Image (cartoon, helix red, strand yellow):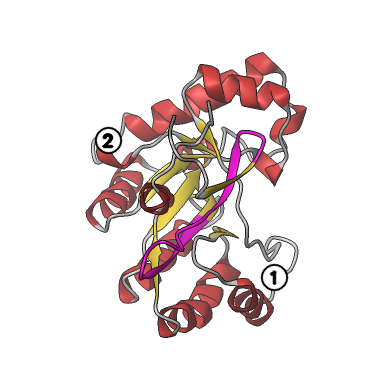
Amino acid sequence: MPNHSNCHYYTDSLYSTKVDHLNEKYVSLTIDDFPNINDLNVSIQILDILKKYDAHCTFFTIGSHVLKYEANLIDDLFKRISVENHELGNHGWRDEMALKLSKFELEKQINDTHTVITKNKHFNHKNLWNWFRPGHGYFNSTILEVCKKLNHKLVLGSIYPYDPQLKYSRWNSSFIKYKLYSGAIIILHDRLATVRTLELVLPEIIKQNYQIVTLTKLYQLSKTSLRPD
């Protein structure tokens, strides 16, 4: 039976990891609602900042956001995701509360978004661990059942400044710094304010000798499986 002591669960949903057995310190950065629904340049600016600080991220993708833009623009974006060693997760088809969806609609949204992600010619299949984060961060037994059926791993997070509601970069960056610990999963959103938040907080995280990694990398470092037997 595998050792699960290094993951923290709420039922079968991963929200944090424990990597105290390692000499280095790690945190995972995750960004929801990718790509930005109003301006693709916001997503590009976020990638630029991550590259500047050698930080890596899991972008939770909304399927309908991808289809809003011309294919060549999305191709360029996905190419950067692959080349710069980020990864894509699944955040459903629309920006809405997953808890309110029927089982049929939830399955369709996850499958349709999965298809949009994986069919792109620049998608790196090594970077897909089928992570699913439910819209608005709430879930129930139906969502857990669907994730298991579709071989997706349900993930929430442990440091969340509620940035869609609190659009103050200094506050959000201070919140993250205050809550920071090795093994944490940070949640932000693909919004203009996040550009400034990252400019403020990434140097501070690095100054404290943390490595900023994808969700999959952090999960692998914890040497655990998601669902205990």
- What is the quadrant of the N terminus in the image? top left
Can you say whether 79 is above or below 183 in the image? above
Image mark for residue 7: none
Q: Residues within 10 Å of mark 1 (few under 14, many from 20)?
A: some
Q: Secondary structure at mark 1?
A: loop
Splitting the image into 4 quarters, where does residue 125 fall? top left
Q: Secondary structure at mark 2?
A: helix
Q: Position of residue 183 (x, y in %)?
A: 50, 60
The residue to which callout 2 is attached is 125
Q: In this view of the protein, which residue sits in the foreground, 42 or 110?
A: 110
Q: Earlier in the sequence, mark 1 or mark 2?
A: 2
Q: Residues within 10 Å of mark 2 (few under 14, many from 20)?
A: few
Q: Amino acid at mark 1?
A: Lys
Query: Which residue is depicted at the point 50% across and 50% down?
Result: 6
Splitting the image into 4 quarters, where does residue 46 fall? bottom left
Q: Amino acid at mark 2?
A: His
Dot in front, 1 or 2: 2
Tell me the magenta residue range.
10-30
Check if residue 13 falls in the magenta segment: yes
Splitting the image into 4 quarters, where does residue 178 fall? bottom right
Q: Position of residue 10 (x, y in %)?
A: 67, 41
74 sits to left or right of 178: left
Image mark for residue 167: 1
Query: Which residue is depicted at the point 71% across and 62% down?
Result: 162
Q: In this view of the protein, which residue sits in the foreground, 39 or 179?
A: 179
